[in-house]
Image (cartoon, helix red, strand yellow):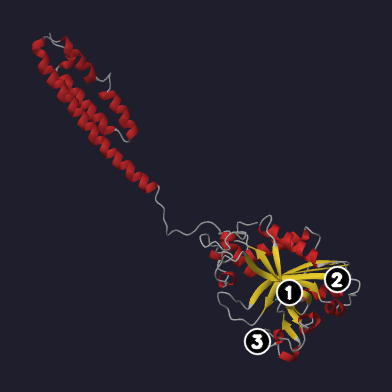
Amino acid sequence: MAVEALSEESVAAAVADAQAAFAAAQDLAQLKNARIAHTGDRSPLALANREIGALPPAAKAEAGKRVGQARQAVNQALARRQEVLEAEREERVLAEEAVDVTKDYDRDPVGARHPLTTIQERMADIFVAMGYDVVDGPEVETEWHNFDALNIGPDHPARSMQDTFFVESPDSGVVLRTHTSPVQIRTMLTQEPPIYMVAPGRVFRTDELDATHTPVFSQIEALAIDKGITMAHLKGTLDHFASALFGAGIVTRLRPSYFPFTEPSAELDLQCFVCRGASVGDPDNPCRTCSSEGWIEWGGCGMVNPRVLAACGIDPDVYRGFAFGMGLERTLMFRHGITDMRDMVEGDVRFTRPFGLEV
Ligand code: DAH
């Protein structure tokens, strides 16, 4: 008994069909369909294999060998085609996903606000929330506003040519302001107390630009003039400012000092907002932000000297005030761990951009 499906011609035809179908497959999906059709349970060779059982024992061996070889040939053809198509896909994916790193940047780079601008606005906002006005003053200032009215006499070292940029000749009486304190004077001259003001702005001193000095830097000045103002108001205001800017509970510390325009005067320290003093006397946990001091020098402050009030036409017997001032670059340096002041003035966007996310 001959079984048609097991004939030499049929088996050879099934092999040839399978090889042709694999060769015709253009991608792996088409190859998968061809594989199912030619090697699956319902493929001609699978069906032929099943017919072997019906053969007389003597014919089984030969038919089995024929079908086995045929299936081997088909599987080899499948594997070869599979390899070729996989390699093609690999190449296509690589080509399609290639990134040309030399191509022009096709987006407009988004600029970033300079951190000095941001911190200035944050500081001013804290005072606006307490009812203070934000005021501006000229950067080119008279010596009288910058020094005399602030009780800085003609012989005061701050007036020497080493610190001050004079505009035109030293006897022109016109300087680049060396601090923001003259804005206090301008405000007191033009406004009736009560006065609550802050003045952020640029100031100028004849320093060489290096890691810790810049001839152009920024300060923020605060002034409160009212009846019955005491140092307790100053301390409370500073503590609130410190908390609002550096974290709840951060306080300030005053150390006796001297400024011509305040009496008494104090240096103003900020409690370290990183270790909060925990690093002091603990060599195992040093603090980089405060050098394990627990406090960071922040600025100067005091009660407005009665002579300054008088120079501005305010009666010191009726009104008192407090004032303070601090450098913004320095504040940014310890706040963000910036080690070189030049980074802040050179205007390189690579420095500014990481701060730009701050609104
Ligand atoms: N003007 C001072 C400076 O540039 C800082 C300062 C100290 C401002 C004490 C103040 C103050 O208002 O009360 O060094």
Image mark for residue 145: none
Which residue, as the protein is rendered here, is positioned at the far front? Answer: 281
Q: Quadrant of residue 181?
A: bottom right
Residue 121 appears anywhere in the view: no
Q: Does residue 88 appear to the left or right of 293 in the view shown? A: left
Q: CA distance from mark 2 to mark 3?
A: 33 Å
In which quadrant is the C terminus drawn? bottom right
The residue positioned 86% from the left and 71% from the top of the image is 320
* Image mark count: 3
Q: Amino acid at mark 3?
A: Gln
Classify 300 as above or below 81.
below
Residue 320 bears which disc, if any? Answer: 2
Q: Secondary structure at mark 2?
A: strand
Image quadrant in which you'd find residue 65: top left
Residue depth check, mark 2 versus mark 1: number of the one nearer the observer: 2
Instruction: Name the N-terminal-most of marks 2 and 3.
Output: 3
Residue where numbered disc 3 is placed: 162
The local secondary structure at tag 1 comes to loop
Going from the N terminus, do you reach mark 2 or mark 1 first? 1
Q: Position of residue 199 (x, y in %)?
A: 75, 69
The image quadrant in which ligand 1 is located:
bottom right
Compared across the picture, whether 45 is left or right of 295 comes to left
User: Marks 1 and 3, Cα distance to the nearest angstrom?
Assistant: 18 Å
Q: Residues within 10 Å of mark 3 (few under 14, many from 20)?
A: few
- In this rendering, is residue 34 above or below 276? above
Q: Nearer the viewer, mark 2 or mark 3?
A: 2
Q: CA distance from mark 2 to mark 1?
A: 20 Å
| Nearer to us in this view, 357 or 42 | 357
72 or 347: nearer the eye?
A: 347
Residue type at numbered disc 1: Thr
